[in-house]
Amino acid sequence: MIDVGKSLRVAMTLHDMQGVELADHLNTSPQQVTIWRRSKSATFKTVKKLADVFGLKISEFLVLGED
């Protein structure tokens, strides 16, 4: 099963990015980033935005969260 929150946590670690920085890139709040980091799922639109920030294809982003 793919865990989107785990994908996000791994991507943030690999890119040495903090939640506030990611929130700035996505024009959202740090609290929203925290919600995504704790979530197991997300909408396609959110996953696409997250993958784009890290310069990844959606499939590359999602594979980071595989168990």
Image (cartoon, rainbow, N blue to C red):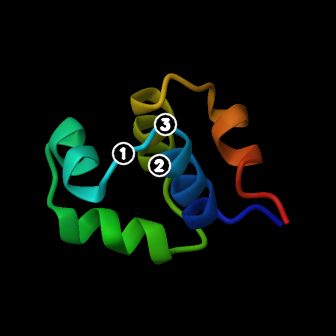
Which residue is under mark 1? 17
Work out how far the residue at label 1 is from the one at label 2, CA to CA, in angstroms.
Answer: 5 Å
Name the front one of labels 1 and 3. Answer: 1
The residue depicted at 63 percent of the width and 34 percent of the height is 58
34 shown above or below 52: below
Res 36 label? none
Q: From the top left corner, tell me how far across and down residue 7 is, in percent.
A: 62, 54
The answer to whether 1 appears left or right of 19 in the picture is right
Query: SS for tag 1?
Result: loop
Q: Farthest residue to the front: give it.
A: 16
Residue type at mark 1: give it: Met
The answer to whether 30 appears left or right of 59 in the picture is left
Disc 2 residue crowd, few under 14, some 14–19, many 20+, Cα 10 Å: some
Earlier sequence position, callout 3 versus callout 2? 2
18 shown above or below 60: below
Earlier sequence position, callout 1 versus callout 2? 2
Residue type at mark 2: give it: Met
Res 12 label? 2
Quadrant of the image containing the N terminus:
bottom right
25 shown above or below 13: above
Work out how far the residue at label 3 is from the one at label 2, CA to CA, in angstroms.
Answer: 15 Å
Earlier sequence position, callout 1 versus callout 3? 1
Residue type at mark 3: give it: Lys
Which residue is under mark 3? 48
The answer to the question of whether label 1 and label 2 lie on touching residues, with beta carbons closer than 8 A, is yes
Query: SS for tag 3?
Result: helix
